[in-house]
Image (cartoon, grey):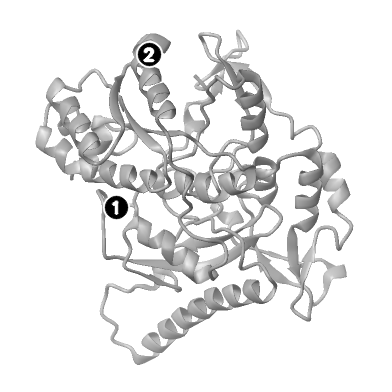
Amino acid sequence: MDVNDRFLRKITVGQGPDEKGMVRETGFDISVASEIMAVLALTTSLSDMRERLGKMVIGNSKAGDPVTADDIGLGGALTVLMKDAINPTLMQTLEGTPVLVHAGPFANIAHGNSSIVADKIALKLVGPGGYVVTEAGFGSDIGTEKFMNIKCRYSGLKPQCAIIVATIRALKMHGGGPQVTAGRPLDNAYVTENVALVEAGCVNLARHIVNTKAYGVNVVVAVNKFSTDTDAEIAAVKNAALEAGAFDAVLCTHHAHGGKGAVDLGIAVQKACESATQPLKFLYPLEISIKEKIEAIARSYGASAVAYSEQVFKPSFLFTSCDVKIAIGLLILRCLLKAEKQIEMYTKQGFSGLPICMAKTQYSFSDNAAAKGAPTGFVLPIRDVRGSIGAGFIYPLVGTMSTMPGLPTRPCFYDIDLDTETGRVKGLS
């Protein structure tokens, strides 16, 4: 369900008179986190989608064996429902450039990439000498990592260049700038020159560049210019990007000037693609264990270790009651055992060879959204491990990451209304 309702995160079902003795706790996922969405984005054909939908595991038998959608006769009906959804929507930019819009898995709770089908159609349309731009949501720690290790594995395609979009304001925040609060004016630090703050924040950009280059692709940094950015701040970003190993760093003004403002970026990307010679390098081989794959990804974040327990049970206050200590300890142990048991179960069922899709905050390399810059030496907490077997990956839940996000403190519906005289909708622009 594509709603943001915290009450749907944990619900009880089986309360009806005909379901006596079958009460259980469950919960909803937002649709962008659903396995069907992931299948749509990772499928390569109608027959492949039919197979993936049928392989989705919906539970386990009493003997511990996986029960699939095909086992309960649902695979065919699911495919019929999705037979038109496999076709991308053809749209265009304001300047007439064709755009294929298809699928919407979020990178923080799913794999965060446009569909393989759309990419392959686009490549066929542009021909051997053409260029296709596809998106991998958020940064190198989630969008790019999943693009390379999941999507590229299933598509067989390799990108020649990766564009990292950077803004002066975001880098200032990573350098220690004040917290930004929605609905409030920006702090003066973000609208006046502060080269030192920009340089301090460039450690974040450097980590993204290094991580992305590790896959064997050239990196071009697009510096997305705001009117308050100064020449000295822009120069600081360009210098830091090149020092970190970027192929090029280019100032972009497309928000103000349209395609004309991104011509230099296009030229830089073309050169980067033409000079690409390295083969695609995956972060981990599929043959290693689930834990080893999780730990390889965690190291790329800057973590020193992985803990298979809930981040929410890291008390920062003093316990005075022995009973409370015991209760908290049991909760931690239960969470630890849950993650461990899930990994053990998926390994036993033969799914340990699948790639990993981390569900993690997009605001930091760590599980802590407030940890800006490029943190190192932290312990990455894994509170649960789940499987999207039909889609083709195992997904650990990092820290408090939820698959059913809640509305912000001031939801946008406050600004939406209808002009009853003209019939025009207000607040959606």
Q: Which residue is mark 1?
A: 370
Element at label 1: loop
Of the pair 243 and 27, the residue shown nearer to us: 243
Q: Quadrant of residue 247?
A: top left
Asked if residue 27 is positioned above or below residue 20 in the image, the reply reads above
- x%, y% of residue 341? 58, 78
Observer able to see residue 406: no
Residue placed furthest toward the front: 277
Q: Measure the C-alpha gap from mark 1 to mark 2.
A: 35 Å
The residue type indicated by label 1 comes to Ala
Query: Does residue 144 appear to the left or right of 30 in the view shown?
Result: left
Q: Which residue is mark 2?
A: 263
The residue type indicated by label 2 comes to Val
- x%, y% of residue 234? 19, 26
- x%, y% of residue 177? 18, 41
Which residue is located at x 55 percent, y 13 percent? 97
- x%, y% of residue 306? 40, 70
Dot 1 or dot 2: first in sequence order is 2
Tell me if mark 1 has few (under 14), some (14-19) or many (20+) residues whose alpha carbon lies within 10 angstroms of its own.
few
Of the pair 425 and 328, the residue shown nearer to us: 328
Query: Does residue 388 appear to the left or right of 276 in the view shown?
Result: right
Element at label 2: helix
Of the pair 55 and 404, the residue shown nearer to us: 55
Which residue is located at x 16 percent, y 21 percent? 230
Which is more foreground, mark 1 or mark 2?
2
Query: Does residue 6 appear to the left or right of 41 in the view shown?
Result: left
